[in-house]
Amino acid sequence: AWDAIHQSNTLDGATIVKLTRTLAIIPITLGLSFYKAYKESKNGGANQTTFQLKKAFPMFILYFLLASIVTTIVSGLGIDTVIFDNLKVLSKFFIVMAMGAIGLNTNPVKLVKTGGQAIGVGAACWIAITCVSLLMQHILGIW
């Protein structure tokens, strides 16, 4: 019985860590989008003389929030979630396909030659996410 309770608490903690990490995408993406749009408007890029919120705002953030709200409402009402279960399977399939396509289209030599800075940023993000995840696990008593 103790193992089942401990495993349930561990899964709950892992879910909290994953959701926190996922929700961190929103302010980071918005901040970077606004910075890029502001920088382009300041430099006169893309024939733009003023900052435009519509061009700076990444629409997938809005869709992500909308999907989260709908899922929360539907699960809170106790409505049968067979549709959502099927959508989860479909989304996993699409993610696997997208990752496979990215991997098959990547030229490692060209990536290193032209994207050294991007690799550095990716590595820094990976390290930051790892540290925050481990910190959250430590705070929650999981690790």
Image (spheres, rainbow, N blue to C red):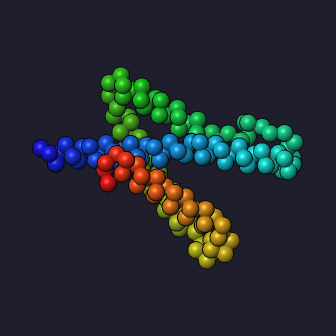
27 horizontally vs 94: left or right: right
Query: Could you tell me residue 136's position as x and y percent?
Result: 40, 48
Q: Which residue is depicted at the point 12% across and 44% down?
A: 1
Query: Depth check: 47 or 3 in front?
Result: 3
Residue under the point 32% across and 28% down: 80
Task: In the rendered view, tell whether residue 77 sits above or below residue 134.
Answer: above
Camera sees residue 93: no
The C terminus: image quadrant: bottom left
Whether residue 65 sits left or right of residue 82 in the image: it is: right
Residue 51 visible within the image: yes
- In the rendered structure, the answer to whether residue 135 lies left or right of residue 25 reads left
Q: Which residue is painted at 58% across and 35% down in the image?
A: 62
Front one among 99 and 13: 13
Q: Position of residue 63 (x, y in %)?
A: 56, 36
The residue sitting at the top extreme is: 77
Measured as percent of width and height from the top left, residue 66 is found at 52, 32
